[in-house]
Amino acid sequence: MNHGPRAAARNRAALVTAAREIYAQYGLDAPLSAIARRAGVGQGVLYRHFPDRAAVATAVLEENVRQVEKAAATEDLTFAGVLGVLTWHLTESAAFIGLLHADGAGRSGIRAYALALSERVERALRGHLPDGHRLGAADDLMLAVAMVSGAVTGPTREERERRALAAWRLLVVEVGPVRPFEG
């Protein structure tokens, strides 16, 4: 049954979730048809929401950053807790990792957008960074995030999480539970 415009928001959310999952499994060059299938919609619905591949990746990135910002806006969440949410996104989203390592080659306009999103992540994290923290120096915080994201490899989410936590441990940084923000 076609629910028409009433289903638009639900379809878009399903497409973003599906894109995150497909990108984590197959990378950013995964077929858009696989995203539509995973979301349970046709490709026409995908293209109504996202005119091209870059728009899909951008929507996933934006949602990842928004979740980190929401977690950081929660007063009772510690720096370690916000890092847990960030680490979940690193282990779940190849697009998010691509953002942190974007060099602009072959993807026009994405570099500037990636830098803006990266700055939003940094602001969210810095808001919870305790005074005197080892990552408090100018570029240390985002350098550590980039280093951890570089370690997030492996065929399964569990392996990627294990490697991310090992990288944080090597940097002597405490991370809270690795989970999406559900607040």
Image (tube, rainbow, N blue to C red):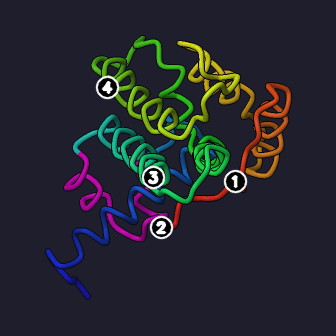
Q: Residue at 56% of width from left, 44% of height from top?
A: 93
Contact check, label 3 and label 2, Cβ < 8 Å: no
- C-alpha separation, residue under disc 4 versus residue under disc 2: 26 Å
Residue at the disc numbered 1 = 178
| 135 with respect to 12 (left or right) | right
Amino acid marked by disc 4 = Tyr
Question: Residue 89: where, in percent of width, then height?
Answer: 58, 46
Amino acid marked by disc 3 = Gln
- C-alpha separation, residue under disc 1 versus residue under disc 2: 14 Å
Question: Residue 177: where, in percent of width, then height?
Answer: 72, 56
Quadrant of the drawing holding the N terminus: bottom left
Q: To which quarter of the image does residue 62 belong?
A: top left
Dot 1: few (<14), some (14–19), or many (≥20) neighbours within 10 Å? many
Question: Compared with residue 56, is residue 129 higher up or lower down, i.e. above or below?
Answer: above
Q: Residue at 53% of width from left, 12% of height from top?
A: 138
- C-alpha separation, residue under disc 3 versus residue under disc 1: 13 Å
Q: To which quarter of the image does residue 54 belong?
A: top left
Question: Residue 85: where, in percent of width, then height?
Answer: 59, 50
Reply yes or no: does residue 35 show up in magenta: yes
Earlier sequence position, callout 3 versus callout 2 = 3
The dominant secondary structure in magenta is helix
Question: Compared with residue 103, is residue 152 higher up or lower down, i.e. above or below?
Answer: below
Earlier sequence position, callout 4 versus callout 2 = 4
Amino acid marked by disc 1 = Val
Q: Nearer the viewer, mark 3 or mark 4?
A: 3
Q: Nearer the viewer, mark 4 or mark 1?
A: 1
Q: Nearer the viewer, mark 3 or mark 2?
A: 2
Residue segment shown in magenta = 32-50
Residue at the disc numbered 4 = 113
